[in-house]
Every structure is written in structure tokens, then in C-alpha cells.
């Protein structure tokens, strides 16, 4: 039904780091965040935030075909929520981010984020877990990159 690994808070708390990050205007969100994680050596963690973008591309996995369908929204939108996690796959930073954006008419679009161009601001809170217990593997049944403990 599920898989998990226990994190002993007493062991990890002295080694955890929390970063408040402001991305530069006009940068690509995923690229900038991955660069930050590489620079700081973050191999596991969680991400939350808000901001604004001029363009965002989302991915939707069709479970029947195990193929992704991408859709780009090229318009000014407010990021109402960024939620995601940081792990590793094949020795590289792996970001799994979901984004919800509010449009001019107050409707929302969102989902699994492929890319987004900041237009205004992007303010993130990153909790880094200084451990390597979280990796990823390609699961053939689902077509997803799942946690590997």
C-alpha cells in the first residue's frame, strides 16, 4: 500500500538547513532551483513558495499510455502554491514540483511543473535534509520515477 523510511528527528535536526530563496526575475524556475540545490549540496528536501510567472509548462501523465502530455500557458499568472520535493536520480538533483497558478480571470491552472519563467518574483522556502536516503528509480508499471529508499 505504501513505502516509507523513518527519519529520526533527533539525528537529523542538527544537520537540517532551512533556506529562504528569492529567484531572480526572468529566470527559469526549475533550472534556477536545481542550480541552487547543486551549489548547496542538497540531495533531499522539500520546497514551498509563491510568486509570479509569464509562462508555465505543465505535464500530465496518461496512465493508460504512460506518456506525458505537456501544455504551456503563456500569460502573466500568480503562483498561488509551489509544493515539491528534492531527491536524487542517477547521481543528479531530481526536482518533483507541482505548481498552481491563478490567471487574470481568477481561474487556476496547475499540475506537475516542467518549466516556468519568473516574471515578478519567486519566493521559496527550502528545507534541506542533509542525507542521501532518498533516491529515485524508473518504475515500469506506473511510468513514474518513484522514491528508492
Image (cartoon, grey):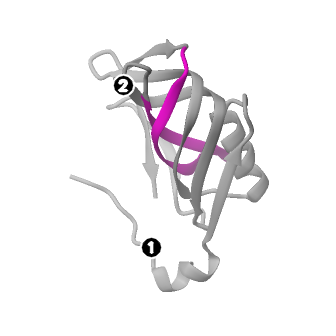
Q: Earlier in the sequence, mark 2 or mark 1?
A: 1
- Span colored in magenta: 75-101
Can residue 18 be spotted in the picture? yes
- Residue 127 position in % (x across, y down): 56, 62
- Residue 9 position in % (x across, y down): 47, 80
**In front of the other: 54 or 98:** 54
Question: Judging from the image, what secondary structure is the residue with disc 1 in?
Answer: loop
Query: Which mark, by number, is residue 77?
Result: none
Q: Are the residues at dot 2 and dot 1 in contact (C-beta closer than 8 Å)?
A: no
Can you tell which quarter of the image residue 55 is in? top right
Q: Give how far apart the Cα atoms at labels 2 and 1 are.
A: 39 Å
Q: Is residue 68 above or below residue 79?
A: above
Residue at horizontal 65 percent and vertical 62 percent from the top: 19
Query: Which mark, by number, is residue 106?
Result: 2
**In front of the other: 33 or 49:** 49
Residue at horizontal 64 percent and vertical 39 percent from the top: 121
- Residue 61 position in % (x across, y down): 37, 23
Q: Is residue 50 above or below residue 60?
A: below
Q: Is residue 79 magenta?
A: yes
Q: Is residue 62 magenta?
A: no
Q: Is residue 35 above or below residue 56?
A: below
- Give the class, few, some or many, for how many residues have Cα within 10 Å of label 2's Cα (few <14, many ≥20): few
13 sits to left or right of 8: right
- Residue 110 position in % (x across, y down): 40, 28
**In front of the other: 61 or 4:** 61
Question: Judging from the image, what secondary structure is the residue with disc 2 in?
Answer: loop
* Main SS class of the magenta portion in the image: strand
Q: Residue furthest front?
A: 105
Q: Which residue is mark 1?
A: 7
95 sits to left or right of 6: right
Amino acid at each position: 500500500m505504501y513505502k516509507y523510511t523513518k527519519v529520526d528527528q533527533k539525528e537529523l535536526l542538527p544537520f537540517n538547513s532551512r533556506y529562504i530563496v528569492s529567484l531572480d526575475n526572468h529566470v527559469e524556475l526549475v533550472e534556477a532551483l536545481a542550480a541552487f540545490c547543486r551549489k548547496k549540496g542538497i540531495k533531499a528536501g522539500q520546497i514551498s513558495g509563491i510568486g509570479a510567472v509569464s509562462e508555465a509548462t505543465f505535464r500530465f501523465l496518461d496512465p493508460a499510455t504512460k506518456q506525458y502530455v505537456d501544455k504551456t500557458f503563456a500569460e502573466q499568472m500568480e503562483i498561488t502554491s509551489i509544493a515539491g520535493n528534492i531527491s536524487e536520480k542517477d547521481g543528479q538533483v531530481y526536482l518533483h514540483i507541482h505548481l498552481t497558478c491563478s490567471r487574470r480571470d481568477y481561474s487556476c491552472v496547475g499540475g506537475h511543473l516542467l518549466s516556468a519563467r519568473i516574471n515578478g518574483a519567486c519566493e521559496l522556502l527550502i528545507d534541506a535534509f542533509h542525507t542521501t536516503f532518498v533516491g529515485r528509480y524508473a518504475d515500469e508499471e506506473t511510468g513514474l520515477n518513484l522514491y528508492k529508499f
